[in-house]
Image: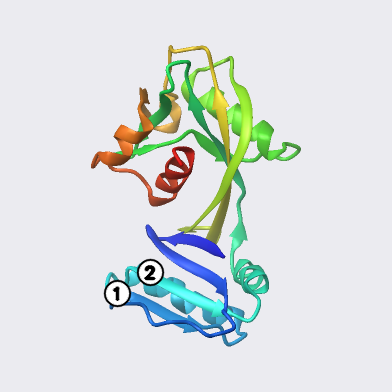
Amino acid sequence: MYKIYVNGRPMVLATLPEQGFQPSSNPDDFITIYTGNPKGLLGYVDMLEKNSDFRQVTIYGKDGERLFREFCTQFKILEAAGGLVFNTEGQALFIYRLDTWDLPKGKIDPGETPEMAAVREVQEETGLTEVQLGAFLQMTYHTYRHLKKGRILKPTYWYRMTTPETQLTPQAEESIEKAEWKSVPDFLESDLPVYPNIRLVLEQAVK
């Protein structure tokens, strides 16, 4: 199963269960079956981009992996990587930009592995120098439109990291206004603005 965020709302691509699927109890959920037309998938993307009536779109196909691959053919892929960094007190590193709390991340440069890019982006965006790479956490996916490049699908690799440092320097040229240490459980219980794919990463970290 793949969960791709479109305009902050999830599009789920999954293999059709042998027994079929049960209708959602939530009237704001839209469920359909893939007909084999990759371009037709963009119609459901448009639903989430332009129509606020739907909370989630779920698309079932005979083969969920193939469905995801065909979905990807309709986008320019821009891979990124980032880190959930913890200090010695168990607090996580958050950055604040564009009126939303986020985690440090950025695109993978040519010649870089996702691990290399994740560490570099953390260092550049927060001013940390001693960053220890830990376990891979998960992938997240979201789409957006670019004026020149068209439709973009951004898969992001997330890694757990640690640092002995506490001093942070937010990267102003990337519009980062603040970098702060926060408790992940307390953050999840708050109403602070955060992207839904970032919330997924945080929720996995405290399982």
Residue 44, relative to residue 194: is it above or below?
below
Residue 148, relative to residue 79: is it above or below?
below
Which picture quadrant has residue 183? top left
Residue 157 shows in the view: no
Which residue is farthest right? 111
Task: Return the x and y of residue 160 as percentages of the image width and height.
Answer: 56, 32
Residue 204, relative to residue 9: is it above or below?
above
Q: How crowded is mark 2: few (under 14 residues within 10 Å), some or many (20 or more)?
A: some
Is the residue under label 1 in contact with that under label 2 (CB below 8 Å)? yes
Give the CA separation, mark 2 to mark 1: 10 Å
Q: Which label belongs to residue 56? A: 2
Image point (63%, 81%), residue name: 62
Which comes before the other along the chain, label 2 or label 1? 1
Image point (40%, 45%), residue name: 199
Task: Return the x and y of residue 76 as percentages of the image width and height.
Answer: 61, 60
Q: Which residue position is annotated with label 1?
A: 26
Amino acid type, callout 2: Gln
* Depth order, front residue of 106/164: 164
Image point (64%, 40%), residue name: 108
* Depth order, front residue of 46/13: 13
Q: How crowded is mark 1: few (under 14 residues within 10 Å), some or many (20 or more)?
A: few
- Disc 1 is placed on an element classified as loop
Q: Which label belongs to residue 4? A: none
